[in-house]
């Protein structure tokens, strides 16, 4: 902790924690300024819209206050939204653990020293580029990609690769629980989508793995630690903050994809059916749902994260 001497006295300077807090506020200041200038007014307006009913008049729109009727209609009257929201939640709960495990495994492999490592890293980051809007529109007409994504083809169509049925048979014979077997086979069916959604997470994990001091591994190896022990005692704790970061990112990415049916439904209600008040209420329900799951993720990982200082 630095000190400043003024007039024979000693005044304490900023602590390391305070300097880090100031740096954090400086990093988020562009977002805060942008939110206050450009998003705060629409933010408040959407809340008022969700609590009313909009009708057109000679001087513009007329907003009649109806309380929480739009919110109750979303759960009581509109069965389609309930089903779409449930599907989005189930898809998120199913996909996020698979994406985190796969991205961490892939980053660990890409962090090893081998010939062509740079090329391999570029290949694993390609899904981020392929998920762009222009490329995504091409994917629908790509015969090779459609072949990869089609889970209904048998093993002969893939030139000898195991089909989902074969994997399921092997897992059942291993006496695994049927729920776990279904989870694994479902992940295999969606392997292309999992790889596509893991590019950013792999990059974050890889950056974290490269930041671990090699001296830690050298010291533990000299003490007789095995590679397995190094992984659980050094690698995993050091990257645990990034597991939290990637989990939060994956939850948000799952809920906010452009192909998400819930977002498409909310947009269609607002701009095709011209029900802007009801669409605003649906948007806030969806936002609160995302916030709840983000809070649960932070609560689960908060006490299991190791911060190296």
Image: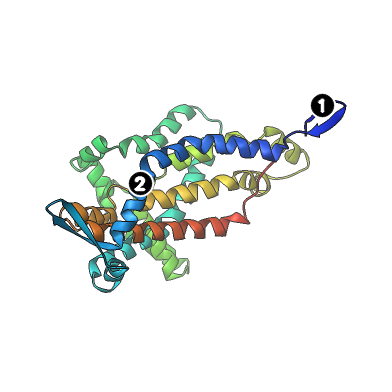
User: What label does residue 41 carry, if any?
Assistant: 2
Q: Secondary structure at mark 2?
A: helix
Residue picked out by circle 1:
6
Q: Is residue 23 left or right of residue 233?
A: left
> Residue 235: horizontal and vertical position, in percent?
63, 44
Query: How many angstroms separate mark 1 from mark 2 (CA)?
Result: 47 Å
Farthest residue in the left direction? Answer: 58
Instruction: Characterize the local packing of mark 2: few (<14), some (14-19) or many (20 or more) Cα atoms within 10 angstroms.
Output: few
Which one is in front, 115 or 301?
Answer: 301
Which one is in front, 241 or 197?
Answer: 241
Instruction: Characterize the local packing of mark 1: few (<14), some (14-19) or many (20 or more) Cα atoms within 10 angstroms.
Output: few
Location of the C terminus by quadrant is: top right
Residue name at image x 45 percent, y 32 percent = 121
Nearer-N-terminus badge (1/2): 1
Q: From what the image shows, is residue 5 above or below residue 254?
A: above
Q: Is residue 181 visible?
A: yes
Q: Secondary structure at mark 1?
A: strand
Q: Is residue 163 visible?
A: no
Q: From what the image shows, is residue 95 above or below residue 28?
A: below
Residue name at image x 68 percent, y 39 percent = 18
> Residue 266: horizontal and vertical position, in percent?
25, 56
């Amino acid at each position: 902790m630095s000190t400043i001497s003024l007039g024979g006295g000693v005044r304490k300077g900023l602590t390391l924690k305070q300097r880090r807090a100031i740096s954090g506020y400086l990093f988020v200041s562009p977002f805060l300024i942008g939110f206050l200038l450009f998003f705060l007014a629409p933010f408040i307006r959407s809340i008022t819209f969700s609590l009313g009913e909009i009708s057109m008049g000679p001087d513009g729109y007329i907003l009649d206050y109806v309380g929480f009727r739009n919110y109750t209609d979303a759960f009581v009257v509109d069965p389609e939204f309930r089903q779409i929201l449930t599907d989005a939640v189930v898809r998120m709960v199913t996909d996020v653990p698979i994406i985190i495990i796969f991205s961490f495994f892939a980053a660990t492999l890409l962090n090893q020293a081998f010939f062509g490592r740079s090329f391999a890293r570029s290949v694993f980051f390609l899904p981020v580029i392929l998920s762009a809007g222009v490329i995504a529109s091409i994917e629908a007409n790509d015969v090779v990609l459609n072949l990869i994504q089609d889970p209904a083809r048998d093993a002969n169509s893939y030139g000898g690769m195991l089909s989902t049925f074969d994997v399921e048979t092997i897992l059942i014979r291993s006496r695994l629980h049927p729920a776990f077997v279904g989870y694994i086979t479902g992940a295999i069916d969606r392997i292309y989508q999992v790889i596509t959604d893991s590019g950013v997470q792999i990059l974050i994990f890889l950056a974290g793995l490269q930041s671990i001091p090699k001296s830690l591994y050298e010291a533990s190896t000299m003490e007789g630690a095995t590679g397995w022990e190094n992984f659980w005692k050094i690698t995993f704790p050091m990257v645990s903050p990034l597991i939290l970061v990637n989990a939060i990112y994956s939850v948000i990415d799952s809920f906010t994809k452009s192909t998400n049916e819930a977002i498409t439904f909310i947009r269609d209600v607002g701009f095709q059916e011209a029900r802007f008040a009801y669409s605003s209420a649906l948007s806030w329900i969806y936002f609160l749902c995302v916030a709840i799951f983000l809070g649960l993720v932070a609560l689960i990982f908060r006490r299991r994260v190791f911060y190296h200082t």
